[in-house]
Amino acid sequence: MATQVNSQPELLPVDIADVRAAHDRIRPSIVRTPTLISRTLSQMTGATVYLKFENLQFTAAYKERGALNTLLLLSDEAKAKGVIAASAGNHAQGLAYHANRLGVPATIVMPTNTPTVKVVQTEGHGANVVLHGDTFDAAYAHARVLEGERGFTFVHPFDDPRIIAGQGTVAIEMFEDVPAIDTLVTPIGGGGLISGMATVARSLGRPVEVVGVEAELFPSMYNRINGTDHPCAGDTLAEGIAVKEPGGITARMVAQLVDEILLVNERSLEEAVSLLLQIEKTVVEGAGAAGLAALLAHPGRFAGKTVGVVLCGGNIDTRLLANVLLRDLARSGRLARLRIRLQDQPGALFNVARIFEQQRVNIIEVYHQRVFTTLPAKGLITDIECETRDRSHLNRLIASLIEGGYDTTQVELA
């Protein structure tokens, strides 16, 4: 659904001059990440796909840009007193890293249930971490209290013109590197990144589509722009854009500058993370893969276009990444669990294993179930996890097992 564009555009708090000034300001201290064509993803989607590898920033996310721009704009007095933020994610890392580099004291308030690895990483950048409350809202409220008590400058993760201008520098580099880009596909959490990038796109003097992407479970900006009331809750892989309330400034900018917001489901996000690792050999978190997920989920929408996609972050838990990759293998048929009904007698499992050997299928794990089953006492269920070449190879194995007289079903993923 297209966003509602105001007939009489209001004056927005960030313009192209702000973004260009931010780029000049931060350029010496950030990584000029590459914008590279992905020939394989282009073939898969029908678009010409260029990827901006913001996961190669020092803290593995674009958030450094806005944080650094904000820090450099502070007065000497504000720098001396220090900055504060509420974040358990990439904003915390980017602000802590550059504040430490510039000698600015930084305090980051995180919920008490923040994973230890994130606390340690943030402290490793020299920040003082304060754990408070069970939710982000509680941590945010406490950060604002400390701001008033101690004279800190609060650095908002997205709803601040200085942050927005800094994030927009991503698009400046993309269009410098690939002027032919005619469509930007950008993840939306609070809206800082897409607001800045759309500002750049609208300054080019030629048509450039700007498409935002949100996780289906957290369509907060979609709701704000389209007047809908979809729930914002759930365990999404794209935790970096799981924002319940978008910014007021960013919502105004998105309403005026963005053409459309698309929603992507969890399966598309998982597929995108897996493909980027397999095809581009790059690790991207769920939020960072949202742009590609939109291309995969809506191929007709982007066919024939020259699309710029921001891989906005690469901070994903290694166990979660492993689960995503294994689930992708299962969905493609290269990894499977088969449930086979056997008679409890000598040689039963051997005869089944022989069929696996004949089909050249590797057995990974075998699980016998004699007790917790509805079968008669002499019956048993065997689950066999196996590795095949592809879906057709798996189908041939199942057909051979059924032909051999074995009641066989595949245990499917949700």
Image (spheres, rainbow, N blue to C red):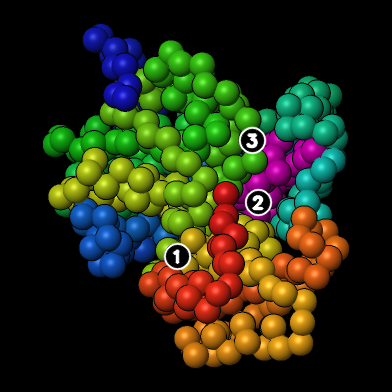
Look at the numbered disc 1 and give the secondary structure of its residue.
Answer: loop
Q: On the picture, is 105 further left or further right than 327?
A: right
Q: Which mark is residue 93?
A: 2
Residue 153 falls in image quadrant: top right
Distance in Å between CA atoms under marks 2 and 1? 35 Å
Q: Amino acid at mark 1?
A: Ser
Q: On the picture, is 104 further left or further right than 211?
A: right
Q: Amino acid at mark 3?
A: Gly
Q: Split into 4 quadrants, where in the image is the N terminus?
A: top left
Location of mark 1 (residue)? 332
At a point 53% along the width and 51% down the height, the residue shown is 286
Point out residue 66 in the picture as x, y percentages from the top left corner: 51, 42
- Give the magenta part as a residue range: 85-111
Is residue 351 visible to the viewer in this orientation of the structure? yes
Is residue 56 visible to the viewer in this orientation of the structure? no
Location of mark 3 (residue)? 234
Q: How many callouts does the rendering have? A: 3
Q: On the picture, is 178 further left or further right than 322?
A: left
